[in-house]
Image (spheres, rainbow, N blue to C red):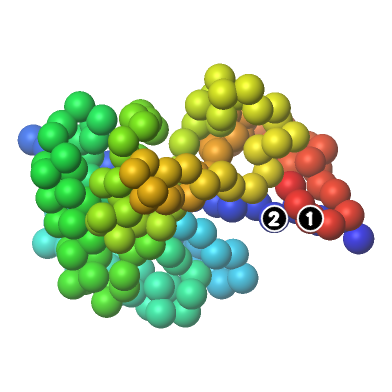
Amino acid sequence: MKKINFLFGIHNHQPVGNFDFVFEEAYQKSYLPFIEVLKNHPQIRIAIHFSGILLDWINAHHPDYMSKLQGMVEQGQLEILTGGFYEPILAVIPKADRLGQIKKLTATVKEIFGYQARGMWLAERIWEPTLPSTLYESGVEYTILDDTHFKYAGLRDEDLRGYYLTEDLCNTVRLFPISKRLRYTIPFEEPQATIDHLRSLVSEDSNA
């Protein structure tokens, strides 16, 4: 039977200083209904990221939501991603600040969920060759980047069906490519467009 392994990740963020009613509206219209639907399908497992500022706000205003997430983490349905706490562009800040930002969010995730984050959301997916050392020292095992980064390095679509190892000063990290096609079909086209695209990628060994 032809299969596909679909790695599904979600990113949630609100900028520092945003109005409280904006946080609340996004929570009611997006964050809450998404989790309520996902919870009804425990066979679907995803990775999910909340920036630190958003995580703090939800924890303060909707602790019941955090309890739902906690249960889904314990059941293995959610993998919580770390990242820079305030969603900084890591490539343009000093290494000490990079480490502080990542470790702060990792510690917050650990405190709230009792979960040690292994993967990381990279703000705006902006890469810099020395980042592997920062990620390695922060305890990050993998992150995700737009597939265009890989294509600029000479890889083709058919080469982007797994992950790649990269390193800095012998410090390694795994990089998973994000499908540009899916980034646009999922939010901006009818669901069938996404389904058709995924069907076009299936293979006998599910290595897609």
Question: Can residue 48 be seen here?
Answer: no
Where does the image place residue 71, in percent across and percent down from the top left?
38, 77
Where does the image place residue 102, in percent across and percent down from the top left?
21, 51
Where does the image place residue 154, in percent across and percent down from the top left?
63, 22
In the figure, residue 17 lies in which quadrant? top left
Pointer 2 or 1: first along the chain: 2
Q: CA distance from mark 2 to mark 1?
A: 6 Å
What residue is shown at x 46% (from left), y 57% (from top)? 47
Left or right of residue 191: residue 34: left
Using the image, tell me which numbered label, if any, was put on residue 188. Answer: none
- Residue type, label 1: Ser
* Crowding at mark 2 (Cα within 10 Å: few <14, some 14-19, many 20+): some
Residue 184 drawn above or below residue 5: above
**Mark 2 and mark 1 residues within 8 Å of each other at the beta carbon:** yes
Q: Which residue is mark 1?
A: 206
What residue is shown at x 17% (from left), y 49% (from top)? 99
Q: Which residue is mark 2?
A: 5
Outermost residue to the front: 169
| Quadrant of image for the N terminus | bottom right
Q: Which secondary structure, mark 1?
A: loop
Q: Nearer the viewer, residue 190 or 165?
A: 165
Left or right of residue 32: residue 41: right
What residue is shown at x 34% (from left), y 30% (from top)? 128
What residue is shown at x 56% (from left), y 29% (from top)? 150
Question: Can residue 149 be seen here?
Answer: yes
Residue 156 drawn above or below residue 186: above
Q: Which secondary structure, mark 2?
A: loop
- Residue type, label 2: Asn
